[in-house]
Amino acid sequence: MNRSSLILPILAILVAVGFSSIFIVDEREKALVLQFGQVKAVKEEPGIGFKIPLIQEVVRYDGRILGLPTQPLEVTPLDDRRLVVDAFARWRIVDLVEFREAVGAGGIEAAQTRLQRIMSPAIREVLGGVPSIRVLSEDRTVLMNQIRDLARRQALALGVDVIDVRLTRTDLPEQNLSATYGRMRAEREREAADEIARGNEAAQRVRAAADRTVVEVTSEARRQAEVIRGEADAQRNSVYAEAFGRDPEFFAFTRSLTSYERALQGGGSSIVMQPDSEFFQYLRSDRAPEGTPRPAAPAAASPETGDATAPAGEQTGQAEEAPAAPPAGQDAVPPAPAVQ
């Protein structure tokens, strides 16, 4: 047999063995070198690694931060109000050897199952020791940190570190939602009724104050108006009395004309009285009735002196008596329009 024909297969076998002894670790991974199930080497840094071909094997794990959504849990806080809680945890592998010993060949899936069993009791323990109002308030951040710390202490036995825990949902069970919403609705309606009652009370106070102010202002205005009206009536009556006192016959004549105007208003007015009644004295004759004082004749000027002289039969210095002024509060009769 030719030696060259043997060298080529041997070289091929050596090249294959050399390549099988080299493995590459990605920056997102961590690797273990196992020999018959026992850990022989740990490769956590990215790069090239070596192993014994056909005897050793390489097991790779994800070295990034992983997420774990928990199953919905029913938790009963201290006030016995049941809550349905969903949580989300972030974790990563920190000890490959311990992780391999804890989960075996199951890898990441087995680790998530184990973490699920750790997270559920931690959530129940922390949330079950506080009232539900704290779970639904700003204190939930403190509660989430407590759950994280509790789960981290237990997860270190698996070679993993729980980085963070978040409560994604905290709701009431479906069977309790209707009753809870009913209580909330009744409470809001009661608060609304109280607000409406307080608003109505305040409105009544404002209306009462406004009504009192209106009455006071109106009364004061009426009082001032009556005072002004009384003063005006007194001044008017004084003016009328002075004007009518100068000519009593003309005063009686104008009063009669005013009476005729008021009595004969309208198209169908009717008056039934005796023909010789004093009411018609100015309609029966163009002369004044007997006993009515006549106005003084105008004085004639003396041709010699130019002074006015009194009429014959009248005494100088005597003035006719003026009629009495109308009582206070009663309107004096204004002059009637001239009769054509």
Image (cartoon, grey):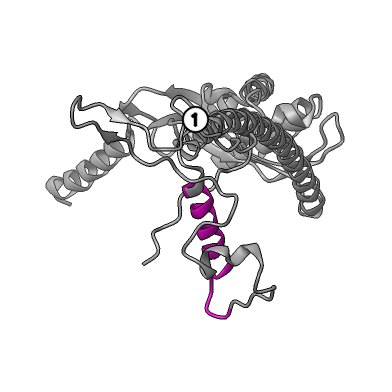
Q: Is residue 183 visible?
A: yes
Secondary structure under badge 1? loop
Amino acid type, callout 1: Ala
Q: Which quadrant would the C terminus be assigned to in this image?
A: bottom left
Return the residue nearer the eye: 291 or 234.
291
* Residue 95 horizontal/vertical position (percent): 53, 21
* Residue occupying image coordinates x 42% and y 40%: 296
Q: Which of the 4 quarters of the picture holds residue 321?
A: top right
Residue on which the image places disc 1: 319
Q: Is residue 83 magenta?
A: no
Q: Residue 234's x, y, as percent?
A: 56, 31
Magenta residues, as a range?
Answer: 250-268
For label 1, the crowd category at 10 Å Cα-Cα, with few meaning under 14, some 14 to 19 and many 20 or more, is few
- Res. 334 visible in picture: no
- Residue at the (20%, 27%) spot, across then down: 306
Q: Is 180 left, or right, of 1 in this rendering?
A: right
